[in-house]
Image: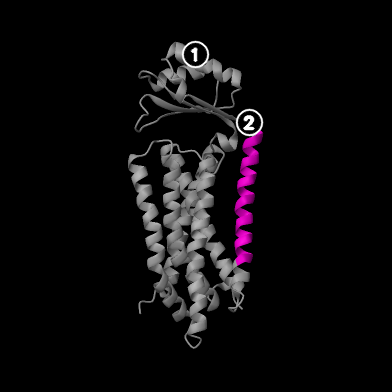
Amino acid sequence: MFNLVQGRRNYFIFSGILIGLGIAAMIYSLITTGAVFPLGVDFRGGTRFELQFSQPVTESQIETVFNEFDLSNLSVIALRGEGLENAWQIRSSFVTPEDGQAVLDALETQAAPLLPETTSVQSVSPSVGNEVTRAAFVAIMVAAVVILFYIMITFRQVPNSFRYGASAVAAMIHDLFIIFGFAAIMGMLRGWEVDALFLTAVLTIAGFSLQDTIVVFDRIRENIARRPLEKFETVVNRSVLETIHRSLATQLNAMFVMVAILLFGGASIKPFIAVLFVGMLSGTYSSIFTAVPLLVAWEKNEIPFLKA
């Protein structure tokens, strides 16, 4: 039987390298921009214009109009995709509804007529953005605590049930660091900003990661009862091999859909799908190569600061 957990030290080194690169990117972003990754209007406050013109316009034409209103933090992105001809997304500092309408009027006068049915202006005040940031942090912390106690109660029949919960939460944190690092890197390379959809991706990834980990841990619990004389490492390895096909099949189906959206979807949704794709890929990896090896290493007293 192939021993997957035997190479756990290599798995930990690989994860450490990935997380280290992500942390380095976040530190660089913090130094250069003041945030660990570029924050959208949903978090830092501001206004997002989603516009579609009736005829082609240039980025410089749009920037000229916005500069007349002395708006800071300006970001102009051309949208691509079916039905998105001459479509743009512009983000700026906070604009009142009156000033927003004045900007739209100036665009129609100096650039090109707008299509009213596709025009959208969304403003978030800085105080609301700060509240969203706090709510996101609290949501992640509460999810981690709830899952920890849930696994401890569900796995109370096996020895050291706390280790199962802690290992699952550690794998979830691993995945969050991976997507945070990815967001920082893409913010530097492509100018992607973190918005409310990013929070949706974070919570979705946390759920998928924990689901996969719990499936493997549940099979470990069953095999411990069935094979009480086997070594713990052997039981764990057997359990992983029995469940790995299910995890891969479930995640690959979703990933194929995401790849199709990344290739053929619109520009506005690509950052969300890319984060979701990377997070699910990391979640599949961490359930098998982070949570399980960490549990084995803990049971064998291989973790220095957690030795019995």
As rendered, which of 186 and 155 lies closer to the eye?
155
Residue 56, placed above or below residue 232: above
Queried whether the magenta region covers residue 102, the answer comes back as no
Give the crowd class for mark 1: few <14, some 14-19, many >=20 residues within 10 Å.
some
As rendered, which of 98 and 181 lies closer to the eye?
98
Q: Which residue is mark 1?
A: 106
Image-quadrant location for residue 14? bottom left
Q: Position of residue 205 (x, y in %)?
A: 49, 53
Q: Earlier in the sequence, mark 2 or mark 1?
A: 1
Residue farthest toward the bottom in the current orientation of the protein: 229
Q: CA distance from mark 2 to mark 1?
A: 23 Å
At horizontal 48% and vertical 24% (from top left) the residue drawn is 119
At horizontal 47% and vertical 16% (from top left) the residue drawn is 107
Q: Position of residue 280 (x, y in %)?
A: 44, 55
**Magenta region, mostly helix, strand or loop?**
helix
Observer able to see residue 12: no
Q: Which residue is mark 2?
A: 125
Look at the image and tell me in which quarter the C terminus lies: bottom right
Residues drawn in magenta: 127-150
Q: How is colour applied across the structure in the image?
A: one colour
